[in-house]
Image (cartoon, rainbow, N blue to C red):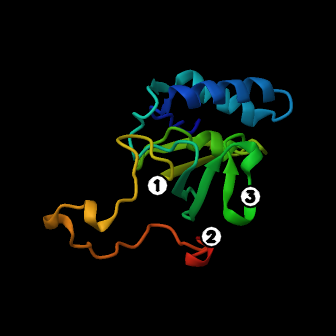
């Protein structure tokens, strides 16, 4: 009996769709099955205008927490091949797991094939899009610009990921 393949609807922005199609097409010989997987994902993706990617969708530069089929919790940042940094858990979209993650929403599961041909399943648990992908851009404002009723600073909210790579105030 053949196992069920999970292929949920995925979403990408127009500009990322173009870039990822070109990346996959130009890498089909050198990156092998991962480039083919990325190309297949881009061919079936729902494409939305730039700035309209829902915040719970994995886009390029997103931090993602997912559960593997071995019940491991993994946290990565999805990047282009030139930005890979294993020490900072930055994985390429041009890897089997990277191609599987692109465009998924929180709660979705997908079947993906590792380099050795083994079938795997992952489930997205949390997405933090580092770059503002929808809505107005954030900007710093002075306390004087805030209306009096909004001058109260809310309590700190812990980030879903560690801040190990934050250089702190000394970097400013």
Q: Is residue 46 left or right of residue 169?
A: left
Circle 2 — which element? loop
Q: Which residue is mark 1?
A: 128
Q: Which residue is mark 3?
A: 85
Callout in the foreground (2, 3): 2
Please state which of residues 19 and 28 is positioned toward the viewer in this rendering: 19
Q: CA distance from mark 2 to mark 1?
A: 16 Å
Q: CA distance from mark 2 to mark 3?
A: 12 Å
How many marks overall?
3
Circle 3 — which element? loop
Q: Residues within 10 Å of mark 1 (few under 14, many from 20)?
A: many
Splitting the image into 4 quarters, where does residue 116 fall? top right
Please state which of residues 59 and 114 is positioned toward the viewer in this rendering: 59
Q: Residue at x 60, y 54 (%)?
A: 77
First of labels 2, 1 by sequence position: 1
Q: Residue at x 49, y 30 (%)?
A: 13
Q: CA distance from mark 3 to mark 1?
A: 18 Å
Circle 1 — which element? strand
Q: Is residue 81 above or below residue 171?
A: above
Q: Which residue is mark 2?
A: 165
Q: Is residue 127 above or below residue 148?
A: above
Please state which of residues 159 and 144 is positioned toward the viewer in this rendering: 144
Q: Is residue 65 above or below residue 16?
A: below
The quadrant of the image that shows the N terminus is top right
Looking at the picture, how far across and down is residue 119, in whole percent?
Answer: 65, 44
Q: Residue furthest left?
A: 149
Image marks 3 and 1: residues in contact by CB distance under 8 Å: no
First of labels 2, 3 by sequence position: 3
Q: Residue at x 42, y 36 (%)?
A: 53
Please state which of residues 162 and 149 is positioned toward the viewer in this rendering: 149
């Amino acid at each position: 009996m053949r196992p069920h393949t999970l292929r949920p609807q995925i979403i990408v922005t127009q500009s990322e769709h173009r870039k990822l199609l070109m990346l996959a097409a130009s890498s089909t010989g050198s990156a092998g099955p991962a480039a083919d997987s990325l190309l297949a994902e881009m061919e079936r993706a729902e494409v939305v205008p730039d700035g309209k990617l829902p915040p719970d969708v994995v886009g390029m530069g997103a931090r993602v927490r997912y559960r593997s089929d071995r019940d491991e919790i993994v946290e990565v940042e999805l990047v282009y091949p030139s930005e890979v940094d294993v020490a900072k858990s930055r994985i390429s979209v041009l890897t089997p797991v990277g191609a599987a993650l692109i465009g998924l929403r929180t709660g979705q599961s997908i079947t993906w094939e590792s380099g050795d041909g083994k079938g795997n399943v992952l489930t997205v648990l949390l997405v933090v899009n580092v770059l503002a992908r929808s809505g107005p851009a954030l900007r710093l404002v002075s306390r004087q610009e805030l209306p009096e009723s909004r001058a109260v600073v809310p309590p700190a909210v812990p980030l879903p990921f560690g801040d190990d790579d934050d250089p702190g105030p000394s970097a400013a």
